[in-house]
Each structure stands twice: as structure tokens, then as C-alpha cells.
Image: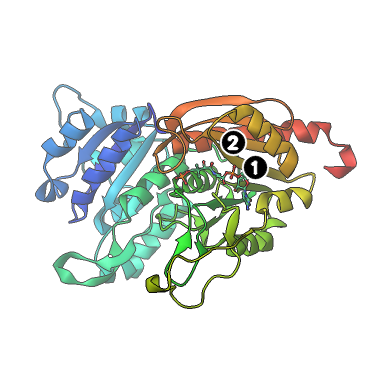
């Protein structure tokens, strides 16, 4: 999504300017072309060389530049997005008041691109009515605001005003650039591997990290969906996503069943245990009592249950972790579990499946329009999955009798 996008990264003068270095790195890693613009205040906190080295682009600091007589219009007109991180109270006041006394404020006036601001300041300043009024005005004008978090501030104080985490800032940039093609849809995603207790300290589990499921939730939220993520993983919650933490297959089934009727799209990316100990011990099993015999029982098949109860206008997506005959097994699961799409990964292939940051899948569909998705980041796979979901919703709506749509 960020690949090839021209992002002007404005850094204003607050202690949180050092965190903009990490934001710059993440944007560059995502393929964006970052043009750093540092205010005079920012240069008291961070060095221009750091940004120019990370961005492979000279840092811009001045309106008065002999090589480029009107840098603010060139930067503003050429940008796909202008990000201000951190945004001080003064920067917000300048933007709200239309003042353009330096390169960054002039660029902000000269752009028609989306603007994202990330305020960071002391709690007293953040809560001041003047700052809040300026922000409200900017929001009314369409500026995207990434609110600060609570936490440690300069000088050891603790409170609201700490710059949002780098991943939250990058997610906000992606959201501001995204086509909101999932807006109006409610999406339910599951992630991670369930843990089935043997006794209070031991469990049967699997290698799922939750990365693929969390990437799916982040992608759906970025594209405007209302997203709930039912997860066993302790990974950061993607911005704008409601999270429900669970451990076992039974808990996941309860959480999903409660929310399924309200969902337009359900994506079962979790690795749900197929079997669990039939009678988990209430107390820790003692080693000196010898090797225990574990009797297992099947868990509920959540996906098959959803398939049996599915509304015609609902889109149900299963995953399949396979080690051979990937496409054929995925088609078999699609039919047996009543899903519309199954995303199958060869979990034995290099870089694919459990725990990796990358994945490689084949998306098989009940309408027969299967698609191979090459090895790429789990977010790229998530993008392909929701593209296929939208496409499937169009083709299946075309085939449904008019009175059932
Ligand atoms: O979490 P990561 O480390 O990022 O790894 C991602 C992943 C490999 C876990 C993911 O891409 C994946 O393949 N998830 C599904 C794993 C799995 O359980 O596959 P399965 O073939 O056993 O199950 C098929 C489908 O039935 C899945 O949608 C599963 O959620 C569902 N199921 C399975 C058992 C059960 N009792 N209830 C279910 O709903």
C-alpha cells in the first residue's frame, strides 16, 4: 500500500522527535519515498543526517533555498501524503491559523494531499482548550489526527500526551491512503493457536503466532471495515480493531458464535486444536506419579458450524494448513465446511505458514475463481484475501435471486 508513495515527513520541535526516526525507517521499509522536513525546533532534538541516511533523501529545512526557489509548493504538490510527527502545540496552532512562517507550515498550506498529524506534548498543554479547539478545527477540515497515548513524558512526568507508537502512526498513514472499500462491512477475524489444558500448567498447543490473523484484522480496519479480532496471541492490537482475548477452542467458539450473526465477513485464520484432553486435571499432575495417560476428545469445528448457519449474504473464509496436495485439500475443506473461500498455505514450504513474517497461499473459491498468491508479507496476503472477498461478494450477489440480496 505504501510502495512508491511520496510522503513528506514533517518533524516539529519536541522531545518525541527522536521517535520520528523509527517512523521514518518503517515508512521506508514499507517502500515509501520519504522526504523529511525538519523545523528549526526539531533540529534541537534530532540530527538531519539521521533522517537523510534513512530516507536516502536530503532533509529539507528552509524556505530559502537557491537551488529550489519554491520548495514548499514543490513538496506540497508532489506529496501523496504529509505526515507531521510529532506535531507540537505550536505546529497545530499554525496549521489551524493558516500561518506559514517556515518550510513545514508553508508545505502544509500548499498541499492538497491527505494530512496526518501526531500530537505530542505535556499533559497540561494537550488538555488546554486552545489545543483541543485547534484540533477540533483541523479534524473538521479533514486532517487525520493520531491521538497521543498515556505514558512517561519528558522530565519524568506521566500522563496523556506521549506520541503514539510508531506502528500506530504507520497504520494511520496507511488508513489515510487506503481506498475504504470495506467500509460499511462488519468483519470478524480469528487469530493464533488455541491452548487446550492438560492441567493448570500444561497444555496442548500449536505453532501459530497469530501474525497472519492480526495482519488480516489490520488490513480490514485500514480499508474501513468495523473489525473484531478474536485472538489467542499477545501481539499488538491493530489500530481501530476491537479485540477479544481467548485461550481454548471452546472460548473461541463462544466468542465467535456470539458475534457471527452481526458479521458480514468471517475469516477463520486461527489454528484451532482438533482434539483436547477430555478431562483436564484440576491440579498439576505430579511427575513422580508416572507418565499420565491422556484421553482426547474432539473440539467443536467452529468453521463447519458457521458454514451450516451461514446467511447467503455472509462471506465465510476458512484457512487450511497443509503439507501436501494443498489445492485439492483446500477444495475438499471448502465443500466439507461450507465456506465461500479457503486460504491454503503449505506450512512446510520455506517462508510460509506458522511464525514467519511471510506467507504464500492459494485462495480457492466456491465460484471456482482460484488465485495463487506468491510469497510476500502476511499483510500482502491479507490484502489479497480481502480483494478476493470483495470480488466473491460481487460475483455471488450477481447470482443470487434479487429478493434475497
Ligand atoms: O499464526 P501464524 O504463525 O501467522 O500462522 C498462520 C497460520 C498457518 C496459522 C494460518 O495461515 C492458517 O493456516 N490457519 C489455519 C490453521 C488450521 O487450523 O488449519 P486446519 O486445516 O487445521 O483447519 C481448517 C479451518 O478450520 C481453519 O479455518 C480453522 O480455523 C478451522 N477450524 C479447525 C478446527 C476446529 N476445531 N475448528 C475450526 O474452525
Is the shortest distance between ligand 1 and the CB of mark 2 under 8 Å? yes
Mark 1 closeness class: few <14, some 14–19, many ≥20 residues within 10 Å: many
**Residue 119 visible (yes or no):** yes
- The number of numbered discs placed on residues in the rendered structure image is 2
**On the picture, is 249 further left or further right than 403?**
left
Residue 317, labelled with which disc?
Answer: 1
Which residue occupies the foreground of this view, 262 or 114? 262
Check the picture and name the quadrant holding the C terminus: top right
Where's residue 31, x and y in %?
A: 34, 30
Where's residue 68, x and y in %?
A: 20, 23
Quarter location, residue 394: top right
Quarter location, residue 366: top right
Is the shortest distance between ligand 1 and the CB of mark 1 under 8 Å? yes
Residue with the most extreme top position: 67
Which residue occupies the foreground of this view, 34 or 188? 188
Where's residue 162, x and y in %?
A: 28, 62
Question: Vertical placement of 142 versus 262: above or below?
Answer: above
Mark 2 closeness class: few <14, some 14–19, many ≥20 residues within 10 Å: many
Residue under label 2: 343
Amino acid at each position: 500500500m505504501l510502495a512508491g508513495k511520496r510522503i513528506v515527513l514533517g518533524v516539529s520541535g519536541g522531545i518525541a522527535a527522536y521517535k520520528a526516526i523509527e517512523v521514518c525507517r518503517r515508512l521506508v521499509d514499507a517502500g515509501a519515498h520519504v522526504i523529511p522536513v525538519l523545523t528549526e525546533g526539531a533540529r534541537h532534538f534530532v540530527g538531519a543526517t539521521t533522517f537523510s541516511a534513512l530516507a536516502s533523501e536530503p532533509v529539507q529545512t528552509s524556505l530559502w533555498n537557491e537551488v529550489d526557489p519554491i520548495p514548499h509548493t514543490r513538496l506540497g504538490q508532489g506529496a501523496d501524503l504529509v505526515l507531521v510527527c510529532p506535531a507540537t502545540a505550536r505546529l497545530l496552532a499554525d496549521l489551524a491559523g493558516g500561518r506559514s512562517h517556515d518550510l513545514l507550515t508553508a508545505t502544509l498550506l500548499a498541499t492538497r494531499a491527505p494530512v496526518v498529524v501526531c500530537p505530542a506534548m505535556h499533559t497540561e498543554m494537550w488538555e488546554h482548550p486552545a489545543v483541543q479547539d485547534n484540533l477540533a478545527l483541523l479534524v473538521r477540515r479533514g486532517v487525520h489526527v493520531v491521538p497521543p497515548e498515556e505514558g512517561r513524558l519528558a522530565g519524568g512526568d506521566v500522563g496523556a500526551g506521549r506520541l503514539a507508537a510508531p506502528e500506530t502512526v504507520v497504520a494511520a498513514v496507511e488508513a489515510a491512503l487506503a481506498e475504504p472499500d470495506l467500509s460499511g462491512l462488519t468483519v470478524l477475524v480469528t487469530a493464533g493457536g488455541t491452548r487446550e489444558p492438560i492441567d493448570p500448567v500444561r497444555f496442548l498447543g500449536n505453532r501459530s503466532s497469530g501474525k497472519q490473523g492480526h495482519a488480516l484484522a489490520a488490513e480490514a480496519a485500514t480499508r474501513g471495515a468495523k473489525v473484531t479480532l478474536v485472538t489467542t496471541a499477545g501481539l499488538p492490537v491493530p489500530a481501530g480493531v476491537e479485540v477479544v482475548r481467548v485461550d481454548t477452542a471452546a472460548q473461541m467458539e463462544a466468542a465467535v458464535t456470539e458475534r457471527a450473526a452481526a458479521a458480514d465477513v468471517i475469516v477463520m485464520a486461527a489454528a484451532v486444536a482438533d482434539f483436547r484432553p477430555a478431562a483436564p486435571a484440576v491440579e498439576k499432575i505430579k511427575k513422580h506419579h508416572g507418565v499420565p495417560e491422556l484421553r482426547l476428545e474432539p473440539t467443536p469445528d467452529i468453521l463447519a458450524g458457521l458454514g451450516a448457519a451461514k446467511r447467503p449474504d455472509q462471506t465465510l473464509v476458512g484457512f487450511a494448513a497443509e503439507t501436501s496436495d494443498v489445492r485439492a485439500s483446500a477444495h475438499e475443506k471448502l465443500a466439507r465446511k461450507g465456506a465461500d473461500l479457503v486460504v491454503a498455505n503449505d506450512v512446510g514450504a520455506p517462508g510460509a505458514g506458522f511464525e514467519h513474517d511471510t506467507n504464500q497461499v492459494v485462495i480457492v473459491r466456491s465460484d471456482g475463481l482460484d488465485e495463487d498468491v506468491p510469497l510476500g508479507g502476511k499483510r500482502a496476503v491479507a490484502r489479497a484475501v480481502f480483494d478476493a472477498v470483495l470480488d466473491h461478494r460481487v460475483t455471488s450477489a450477481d447470482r443470487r435471486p434479487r429478493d434475497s440480496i
